[in-house]
């Protein structure tokens, strides 16, 4: 059982460390990050029931990918992140939005991973595949959410526009991710890998952009 939990949680822990190390110039309080992670973890309970309810209204790959999974999961994450962090005094730079979003999302991914692996006989193979794709996928959707959330947080205008994008863009990316897998169209795995590469590229660019801004603020304050 200990081995199972280690396999389930290791990817999230590794990615949490990766994001935490990126936030080296003005780190967020541990209590905020832990709260977000726990709320993300616990959100799998209401998400499970909402997804089961929505499943009664459709079974197709598009509906399942974009509505049952994408909309439900990203909406719950957004509600948690926005309600807890958006007006925090500690939310004082754009990188913070990504950090908050990733900790929440990886809390969700950790619980989801445990549930998936518990229900698989070959839990090692399942854990490896989810560790390579599903868990990083949640992080990448979260970077997109945090990117737009911070644009809204520090915007002089267009705040509603950026807030809408903070929710809709992760839903879109999550939906495309799942739709490729659910539809099993010809050559789907090649398309899936290309989409994963695209996700990493755009989101690492967004992350690094905010890291550079964070460093510039730090350097300016420490001249």
Image (cartoon, helix red, strand yellow):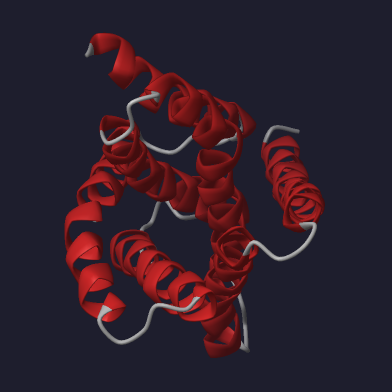
Write down the quadrant of residue 23 in the picture: top right
Residue 92, relative to residue 76: is it above or below? above
**Image location (x, y in percent) of residue 12:** 45, 31
Write down the quadrant of residue 58 in the picture: bottom left
In the image shown, does 181 or 4 lie closer to the viewer?
181
Q: Residue at x 68, y 44 (%)?
A: 214
Residue 82, relative to residue 6: is it above or below? below
The quarter of the rendered structure image containing the N terminus is top left
Q: Residue at x 77, y 50 (%)?
A: 209
Q: Residue at x 20, y 49 (%)?
A: 42
Residue 7, relative to residue 172: is it above or below? above
Task: Report whether 47 appears left or right of 65.
Answer: left
Task: Report whether 131 appears left or right of 121.
Answer: right
Give the farthest residue toward the top: 3
**Image location (x, y in percent) of residue 215:** 73, 38
Inspect this view and state whether residue 93 appears: no
Query: How many marks overall?
Result: 0
Inspect this view and state whether residue 165 appears: yes
Q: Residue at x 39, y 43 (%)?
A: 109
Task: Report whether 9 appears left or right of 50.
Answer: right
**Image location (x, y in percent) of residue 94:** 60, 56
**Image location (x, y in percent) of residue 171:** 53, 72
Task: Report whether 88 appears left or right of 151.
Answer: left
The quarter of the rendered structure image containing the C terminus is top right
């Amino acid at each position: 059982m200990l081995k199972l939990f280690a396999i389930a949680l290791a990817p999230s822990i590794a990615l949490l460390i990766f994001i935490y190390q990126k936030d080296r110039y003005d780190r967020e309080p541990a209590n905020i990050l832990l709260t977000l992670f726990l709320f993300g973890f616990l959100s799998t309970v209401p998400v499970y029931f909402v997804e089961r309810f929505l499943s009664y209204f459709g079974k197709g790959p598009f509906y399942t990918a974009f509505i049952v999974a994408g909309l439900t999961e990203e909406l719950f994450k957004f509600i948690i992140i926005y309600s807890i962090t958006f007006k925090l005094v500690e939310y004082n730079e754009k990188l913070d939005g990504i950090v908050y979003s990733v900790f929440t999302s990886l809390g969700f991914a950790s619980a989801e991973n445990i549930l998936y692996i518990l229900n698989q006989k070959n839990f090692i193979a399942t854990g490896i595949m989810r560790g390579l794709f599903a868990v990083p996928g949640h992080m990448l959707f979260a970077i997109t959410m945090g990117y737009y959330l911070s644009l809204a947080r520090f915007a002089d205008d267009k705040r509603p526009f950026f807030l809408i994008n903070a929710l809709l863009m992760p839903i879109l990316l999550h939906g495309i991710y799942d739709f490729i897998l659910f539809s099993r169209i010809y050559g789907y795995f090649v398309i899936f890998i290309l989409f994963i590469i695209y996700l990493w590229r755009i989101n690492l660019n967004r992350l690094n952009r905010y890291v550079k801004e964070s460093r510039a603020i730090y350097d300016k304050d420490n001249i």
